[in-house]
Image (tube, helix red, strand yellow):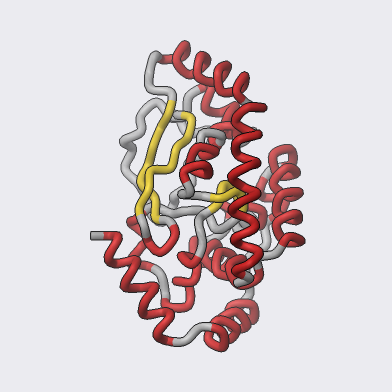
Amino acid sequence: MHKNYIRFKYCVDFLFALFMLTATSPIFLVVAIAIKAEDGGKVIFKQLRTGKQGKKFYCYKFRSMKSTTVAFDKDHPVISDKNANVTKVGRVIRKFKIDELPQLFNVLKGDMCFIAPRPLLPVYDSDYRDWELIKFEMRPGLTGLGQVNGNGHLSIEDRKYYDAYYVMHASLFLDLKILFKTVLLVFVGEKKFLRPVTEAQYAALKREIKINYSSNDIICAELKLQAYGK
């Protein structure tokens, strides 16, 4: 991980989040009114996620479902827009990723940044293999490498591979590539960008992490993840 670039990235993200909140404030107002008008329920949905060094935080979204207490299935975590529990407004804001806009506040708070591994639910904390723990070396993002390479169409293992790969190779060029593909997938769909991970890719990344991270680094990361999970 290029630490100087990451520090620069966090500063730019804070300033850009301030700009985006100002620029999108009319969208916030329209979406909030639409959600409230449809069923009178809460506008903002918050959910506990695992962030940098295993620290837990509440991730904000515009509510897109009728009920937010649906049983979670680790094997099928992505809920289809055709699901009966998704509201009419929810289908629209999910399609254009507008439901993610409240996470701009997460960026301002320092919980998240714009481009990095997406934060998962704490239920996944015990599933990480040692080499995957480097994901927690940086703040999670609004979008990431896994999201522009298939997202919900990928297995959870492949998504975690892309998370670890990003942390090892974060750069301005990679961020711009992810940003460009994020805009494209809004119009053409995630499946068009599906890139499953090969065994050769897994093996190469594991070797790279082993060379750059000692066993002590990995043990410390695991202890931090466990500590914040209590």
What residue is at 67 percent from the left and 62 percent from the top? 195
Q: Nearer the viewer, residue 193 or 177?
A: 177
Viewer can see residue 95: no
Of 83 and 88, the residue lying toward us: 88
- Identify the image quadrant of the C terminus: bottom left
Tell whether 224 sits left or right of 157.
left
Q: Residue at x 51, y 49 (%)?
A: 112
In the figure, residue 223 lies in which quadrant? bottom left
Q: Position of residue 120 (x, y in %)?
A: 43, 54
- Tell me residue 26's x, y (percent): 62, 19
From what the image shows, is residue 53 above or below residue 96? below
- The residue sitting at 66% across, 64% down in the picture is 5
Q: Is residue 84 left or right of residue 115?
A: left
Q: Is residue 42 above or below residue 214?
A: above
Q: Is 1 drawn above or below residue 47 in the view shown?
A: below
Q: Residue at (75%, 44%) from the top-left corner?
A: 184
